[in-house]
Image: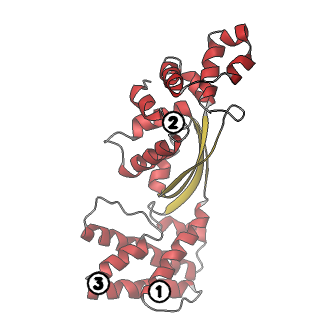
Amino acid sequence: MKVKLIAWNKLGEDNSRKIVILAVKVSCGKVREKGIDYYIERNYSDEDYRKWLIDALKYPSVLEHLVFTFYIEGISRVCSHQLVRHRLASYTQESQRYSESYMKKAVEKVAHICSKKLEENYDYYSRLIEEFLKIAEEKQGEYRNLVIAAAQEAFVIPWSLSLKEKYCLARSYLESLAEYYRLLAKGVRKEDARFIIPQAIKTALIMTVNLRELLHIAKLRLSNTAQWEIRELVKRMVEEASKIVPEITNLIKSYRE
């Protein structure tokens, strides 16, 4: 999983957190009294920012003016389907037709393990995977880790599973790939053959979200009851956003709907 904060807004060349303070001052009429330049040019200490941001939770609409854009890569579609349910954000997700590149990496990994030259042929892909899985079942041992490694090129495997469970899941992932390529070899359209691919297939997306919604997402998804993958994703988003808003962890703790 890769999570990187790639863009955020700020007031001129100044601190991004000042946007929230300016919104508070507009709300209470102070900007009209002293003029907007006074608050744009005013310097605040870290303690000032901490105080004003925590106080802003009383009027959370002011937090919506601070916006973050994240690049997210290597999560499963199980995870992305949960993420996009948070509708007060904008998403551009990698089309599933481009999941082909992830699957190709898994096939290339299998070919490398088997010391085989990769032929650009769907039927060959299918037979190669089946042969690999047959060898793994016969030899077991270290081959179980190799099956897991190959599957992880294209799919997410839950960390909580035992080695045996990871192996069984990885086998089923690769079996689905073998069947996918078998269908393509028979002339089935890719968009139809794709129905057999598990939701564990990896994906990538860009997400833009304001601070208020990020706090809402974090409050829900950092809970121990949240699914492990989205919990890890949001944890990393918060870590990235903390580079811009160091107070964000305290804001999450204090945030109320």
- Three-letter code, disc 3: Glu
Q: Image quadrant for the C terminus?
A: top left
Q: Name the spot of residue 146 as percent of width and height, x first.
A: 36, 79
Q: Is residue 157 left or right of residue 209?
A: left
Q: Earlier in the sequence, mark 2 or mark 3?
A: 3
Q: Residue at x 59, y 71 (%)?
A: 190
Circles 3, 1 touching at the beta carbon (< 8 Å):
no
Q: Which residue is mark 3?
A: 137
Q: Secondary structure at mark 3?
A: helix
- Three-letter code, disc 1: His
Neighbor class of circle 1 (other Cα within 10 Å; few <14, some 14-19, many 20+) is: few
Q: Which residue is mark 2?
A: 214
Q: Name the spot of residue 198 as percent of width and height, x first.
A: 44, 64
Label 2 – label 3 distance at C-alpha: 46 Å
The answer to which of 24 and 131 lies nearer the viewer is: 24
Q: Nearer the viewer, mark 2 or mark 3?
A: 2
